[in-house]
Amino acid sequence: MVSLSDFDLIALVFGESSSTLELIFSASALIGGVLFLLWFCLMLLGGVAEGVFEGLFGLEFDAMSSDGSFDAMTFQGVMAFMMFFGLAGLYTLNSDGSDSLAIAAGGIAGAASMYGTGKIFQVFFALEASGNIEISEAVGVKGTVYLRIPEGGVGQVQLELGGALKTYNAKSEDGQGIATGDFIEVVDTITSTLVVKRV
């Protein structure tokens, strides 16, 4: 009869480990992989990861901030390092590599994965930021009247902003009407409406 003392949880999870180093690599790969998969699933659900980690650890951070920066010691980077450090180390050990070679291979793979994760997040941040144009950036930009601006009223203007031709509601600075096709310059903004003058 099998007793509870015969149940070896470490052997069940990590297999029959022949060395402490192999156990370290296995644990690193398993922990990093599970955490990375969990984080990815939470990110797909949208912002849930932020709430979970802020609630559990009292950390305040924006997981998908659009500042385009990447710090190597982010949660994602550490998870990627652990996962690839473990996988590369195990592969090298199982390919009859020495312990020092396995550690070196794991370190290089981990560092490369951390760098790659950073680059991927920079691309995501750039894509997120590229569509966000503040209306205040239009001040000083020149364009044309697309839909006549009536006296004391609101029309529409077209101007190039953020590398694309955009149409905005606009009113004239002096309250006078501006005809379709006239050239204008943005001098101010009022909420989502531009204040323009003839040029």
Image (cartoon, rainbow, N blue to C red):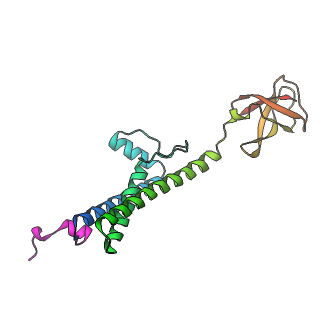
Residue 33 at least partly seen: no
| Residue 98: quarter of image | bottom left
Residue 141 % position (x, y): 78, 34
Quarter of the figure that contains the N terminus: bottom left
Q: Is residue 82 left or right of residue 69?
A: left
Q: Which residue is nearer to you in this view: 190 or 93?
A: 93
Q: Residue at x 73, y 34 (%)?
A: 138
Tally of numbered tags: 0
Q: Residue furthest bottom?
A: 1
Q: Residue at x 52, y 51 (%)?
A: 121
Residue 5 % position (x, y): 10, 68
Q: Residue at x 43, y 45 (%)?
A: 50
Q: Which residues are magenta?
A: 1-16
| Residue 83: quarter of image | bottom left
Quarter of the figure that contains the C terminus: top right
Q: Which residue is nearer to you in this view: 128 or 176?
A: 128
Q: Which residue is nearer to you in this view: 191 or 87?
A: 87
| Residue 55: quarter of image | top left
Residue 6 lies within the magenta run: yes
Residue 27 % position (x, y): 29, 61
Q: Is residue 104 left or right of residue 169?
A: left
Above-or-below relation of 75 to 32: above
Residue 189 at least partly seen: yes
Q: Is residue 185 left or right of residue 25?
A: right
Residue 45 lies within the magenta run: no
